[in-house]
Amino acid sequence: MLRLRFRVVCGTRRTLALVDTSDPRCPECRGAGGTAHDYGHPGTGEYEGTVYEPCPCSTPWVLPLLPLPRWLRRTPRGYSSEPPF
């Protein structure tokens, strides 16, 4: 069964798309769409990366509908990357 939602996806350009979401009642992923497994270097034990294992309840189905206009894709002029403290 498809559970369709609207979502903004980022490819070469931000686009409004219709996507299928994972099942919120799935006992394996609990609605997350998959499970992330962290792994480390066998010799040192240092973190090396994460492997994402997709769940069968979610599908990579995406239908792009329309690209967002340029004025919706820009960062607001009053935006600051400085922390508030």
Image (cartoon, rainbow, N blue to C red):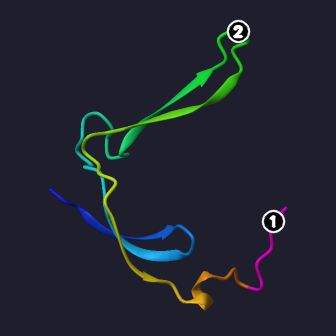
Q: Position of residue 42 (x, y in %)?
A: 65, 11
Looking at marks 2 and 1 on the same chain, the residue that comes earlier in the sequence is marked by 2
In the image, residue 26 sits, relative to residue 74, either above or below, namely above
User: Which residue: 80% across, 68% down?
Assistant: 81
In the rendered structure, the answer to whether residue 45 lies left or right of residue 17 reads right
The residue labelled by disc 1 is 84
Task: Identify the element where label 1 is drawn.
Answer: loop
Dot in front, 2 or 1? 2
User: Which residue: 69% across, 80% down?
Assistant: 75
In the image, residue 6 sits, relative to residue 46, either above or below, namely below
* Inter-mark Cα distance, 2 to 1: 41 Å
User: Which residue: 54% across, 75% down?
Assistant: 14
Mark identifier at residue 25: none
Crowding near pointer 1: few (<14 within 10 Å), some, many (20+)? few
In the rendered structure, the answer to whether residue 78 lies left or right of residue 58 reads right
The residue labelled by disc 2 is 43
Q: Amino acid at mark 2?
A: Gly
Q: Amino acid at mark 1?
A: Pro
Q: Position of residue 65 (x, y in %)?
A: 36, 80
- Point out the stretch of residues depicted in magenta: 77-85
